[in-house]
Image (spheres, grey):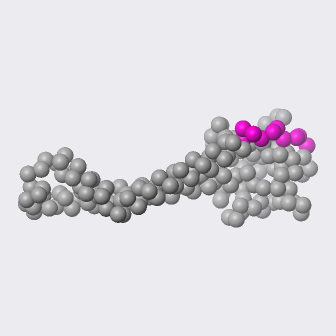
Amino acid sequence: MITNRIKILDPDTGAIVDVCHGPTPDGGCPRARRNGVVPCAGYLISPPEADPRLWPLPVPRDYRHCELGWSEQALRCLEKAETYRRRWRAGAARETGRVFERAAQRDPRFRKMTRLQLLDTGLRRWRLTGSAVQLARAEKRQRERARLYLSFAEFRRTTATAPLHGAPR
């Protein structure tokens, strides 16, 4: 969940009329009215330091869903992708270290190699392991999901009609 304060802006003036803290973990709006309409309905919303290509986003009048979900999902996917990438790099470093250790122990396969050849060999050996393949696939899948969520958000922004000013508060 986005823990920053989400600005709710007047569509005519751009002035901040309210703030919220984003959706609950299940994606619902904690401030929705009894009829389910979100308090930002009829206004613009924008997280702090938002990408100007995607924000502010107009929220249609009488809307019942939190619009922040797609961007949050993209952020979560990118964070997971970075975690997989860090794990992949750590595995590559371990395997490269093993190759250097074997070269230092005068292993006939590695003892005559240059430093660059040892680095290349360690990386090649790591890339062939099942762990490296799985981590690379997981990273790629998370990055593709992030792109998909961002595409949804961009599509929503480009197809959104301008909200009507004066939505009930």
| Res 27 seen here | yes
Instruction: Report the side of 148 relative to 84 (left or right).
Output: right
Q: Is residue 161 magenta?
A: yes
Query: Residue 146 appears at what percent x and percent y?
Result: 57, 51
Residue at image location 19% in from the left, 46% down from the top: 116
Q: Position of residue 53 (x, y in %)?
A: 65, 37
Q: Is residue 115 left or right of residue 168?
A: left
Residue at 18 percent of width and 48 percent of height? 117
Q: Which residues are magenta?
A: 157-166
Indicate the position of residue 87 as horizontal and vertical percent values. 39, 60
Point out the image quarter for the N terminus.
Answer: bottom right
Residue at (28, 61) in percent of width and height: 94
Count numbered badges in the picture: 0
**Position above or below: 74 against 58:** below
Which is the main secondary structure of the residues drawn in magenta?
Answer: loop
Q: Nearer the viewer, residue 6 or 100?
A: 100
